[in-house]
Image (cartoon, rainbow, N blue to C red):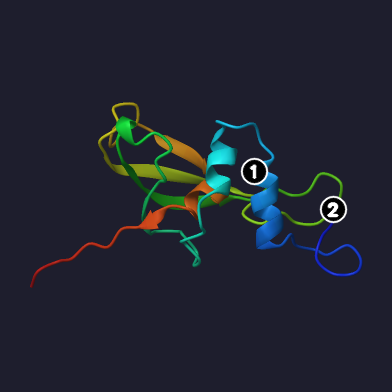
Amino acid sequence: MAFIGSTLSLLESPEQEVARLASAPQGSRSHFLSGLPVQVTADPRGSLIELPAQFPENGRVVVVAYHQRPDTPADNGPRLRHHASWDVIVVASTDPRYPVGGFDLAISEAELVRGRVVEIQVAP
């Protein structure tokens, strides 16, 4: 995989990330994510994020990310974009596999940043 610049760069480009995700087998979560835009550009910690629905018939899942688990390159190679995983708690769900308060999940950062930030309006 060639990286930004004339020599080896320290970070893969957005296009390279999409190509890496798209190289996963068709039907896989990574391949699905390769077709989605990054929507969460700030630190996701503490945000309400609706995860992307690969199979909408399974329902919707909204989580709050609270702990990042960085992944370091094994061979001192370039750092991959959105390479970490996040511990999240389910705060809203219509998917019976992921009930609210059921258990925490570990979600890839690539999936989390392709989710949608959920805004809550509080009336005065």
Relative height, residue 10 to residue 74 (above, below): below
Which residue corresponds to the image point at 64% horizontal and 43% vertical from the top-left? 22
Give the labeled residue for mark 1: 22
Residue 63 x, y percent position in the rendering? 36, 47
Total marks shown come to: 2
Q: Is residue 119 left or right of residue 1?
A: left
| Residue occupying image coordinates x 43% and y 37% | 54
> Which residue is found at the position 51% from the left and 47% from the top?
111
Question: In this view of the protein, which residue sits in the foreground, 108 or 31?
Answer: 31
The reply to whether dot 2 and dot 1 touch (C-beta < 8 Å) is: no
The residue beneath circle 2 is: 77
In this picture, residue 40 sits left or right of residue 80? left
Amino acid carrying label 1: it is Ala
Sequence order check, earlier mark of 2 and 1: 1
- The percent position of residue 107, horizontal first and vertical second, equals 50, 42
Which residue ends up furthest to the left in the rendered image?
Answer: 124
Residue 58 versus residue 63 in the image, above or below = above
Q: Amino acid at mark 2?
A: Gly
Eye-nearest disc, 2 or 1: 1
Could you say whether the residue bearing mark 2 is in a helix, strand or loop? loop
